[in-house]
Image: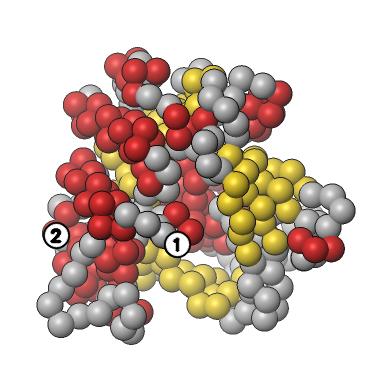
Amino acid sequence: MAKIVTLGELLLRLSPAGNARFFQANAFDVNYGGAEANVAASLAQLGHDVSFVSKVPANAIGDAAIGTLRKCGVNCRHIARGGERLGIYFLENGASVRPSSVVYDRKHSSITQALPEEFDFDTIFQGADLFHVSGITPVLSKEAAALTIEALKQARAHGVLVSFDLNYRAKLWTENIPQKQKMLCDMMQYVDICFGNARDAAKCLGYSEPGTDFLDGDYKICVDETHMKHVLEKYDFKYLITTLRGSISASDNNWSAAVCSREKLYHGHEYHLHIVDRVGGGDSFASGFLHGIVSEMGMEKSLEFAIAAAAIKHTIPGDINYLNEAEVLTLMNSDGSGRVQR
């Protein structure tokens, strides 16, 4: 069992039941989550000692959000209380030819006002093996950026392995793009494991190569061995990992991934998914790979574990993946047919 720390925003998710449109809804289903919170919840269920660092309002909604993580076994004692509100996002689940849609309502949320001095990083990182954060958090506000960079510096100072999911979100990148790219690029010096590919790096870090269009060109070049290795070497990552999603429709996807090291690029198994809820799939993937690495499974088995864990998440409503190691290993060693277990 590893000691793991994640940092990020806890969000309230409101969504119409099933595949209803916002316009049809007279009630919303309630879920709590957020990129790094979802990773924390999965890793805790996989048996690790996981702490989540954040700030949520000191009210009943904040209590409910924290309670969701505690139910999964996450240590929440490093969550600061205060600020104006919990961030909200509204999700309309797509189906068939209609994609899912998200509307954010997260301005002035508590995490955007959190300050580094509210957190005792010496205590937080004492004995820690791994720290995980995503590119979502630092672009929320200047305060969230300062908190993220301080946490990264403290993790490095404490000798902690650092994982960073670039996690590009177009709706959070509508302004100050060069400044945000430079900020995230500066953070990469502290990162050992990065989730992303050449296109993600181009969007989030301003990465480029002469004569190559990563933004509008053929996506295959963004995830091939040559360009994955170029990104890995540029930022001195130990691993660069990307998901590979083939969208047949909003309801059906082909799902796989690849991991790059300095030695090689490894492609994992592909699953054919009928989707219940894809939100949190990438977070489940990240947590699966990190579980494999800290459990010393090796690069290739860690990737296969990550793909299978995320495949399971696509069958579960809500942001959080409710799973255990045994069922992920069972899927890895089966044909994925979903037969009843008696």
* Mark 1 neighbour density, 10 Å: few (under 14) some (14–19) many (20 or more): few
Q: Is residue 291 visible?
A: no
List x then y, in percent, for residue 222.
30, 74
Judge whether residue 36 can be spotted in this image. yes
Kindly give the residue lying farthest to the front in the view shown: 175
Q: Residue furthest right?
A: 26
Q: The N terminus appears in which quarter of the rendering?
A: top left
| Quadrant in which residue 72 is drawn | top right
For the C terminus, the image quarter is bottom right
Name the residue carrying label 1. 170
Disc 2 packing (10 Å; few <14; some 14–19; many ≥20): some
Spot occupied by residue 263 in the image (x, y as percentages of width and height): 17, 63
| Tag 2 residue | 233
Q: Where in the figure is residue 273, as x and y percent of width and height?
A: 62, 71
Q: Residue at x 42, y 48 (%)?
A: 136
Q: Is residue 201 above or below residue 190?
A: below
What amino acid does circle 1 point to? Answer: Ala
Q: Is residue 323 above or below residue 70?
A: below
Pick the front one: 63 or 23: 23
Q: Residue at x 17, y 54 (%)?
A: 235
